[in-house]
Amino acid sequence: MIKRSQCRQSGFTLIEIVIAFTILAMGSILAVNVIAQNTIRVSKVNQHLILMNTLESAIAIVRSEISQNNIKNQYRGQAAGGYQWLATVEPQLDQEPAQQKQYLKLYTLNFQVFHEKEKQQLSLKTILANH
């Protein structure tokens, strides 16, 4: 004779399998969500780096022009990927007439870097000394 305790089958019940698949599905959804958010963040960081590189290039161009005494009120330029920049130059006029024979001339520079389609913009205001 076979006892009842020996007839019991080993394995998982249907409810245990459903619970395991539910937990697995929730973990997978969470992992996909984290990956998607990180992809978006990486894209934004890359766009910001392009803005910063464009700004650095614009500063170098304007500094070079001013150092060669090719001073204009406005400078414009474009970079790769449709990024544009605009720089305005304003001489510092708050100096007294007795100090007009100075060795350094000061300029206020306003930079704007932007991309029309990406709706991003970066601005910088600085002072440049030129002799």
Image (tube, rainbow, N blue to C red):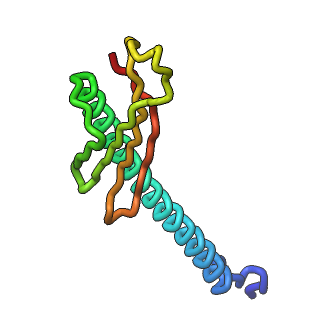
Question: Which quarter of the figure has residue 27?
Answer: bottom right
Q: Quadrant of the N terminus?
A: bottom right
Q: Residue at x 26, y 32 (%)?
A: 71
Q: Say if residue 11 shows up in the picture.
A: no
Q: Examine the rendered structure and indicate whether residue 38 appears above or below residue 111.
A: below
Residue shown at 59% from the left, 73% from the top: 26
Farthest residue toward the front? 97
**The one of 78 and 96 positioned closer to us in this rendering:** 96
Q: Residue at image x 44%, y 30%?
A: 92
Is residue 30 left or right of 67 when viewed as pictured?
A: right
Is 91 located above or below residue 15 in the figure? above
> Residue 7: image x %, image y %?
71, 84
* Residue 32 location (% of width, % of height): 49, 67
Q: Residue 42, relative to residue 63: is it above or below?
A: below
The C terminus: image quadrant: top left
Question: Where in the figure is residue 107, as x and y percent of width and height?
Answer: 40, 30
Q: Position of residue 35 (x, y in %)?
A: 47, 61
Q: Tell me the residue at 57%/67% (across/down).
A: 30
Q: Is any atom of residue 43 visible in this view? A: yes
User: Left or right: where does residue 9 sit relative to residue 87?
Assistant: right
Count how many numbered circles sit on residues in the image. Answer: 0
Choose top left, top right, bottom left or bottom right for residue 100.
top left
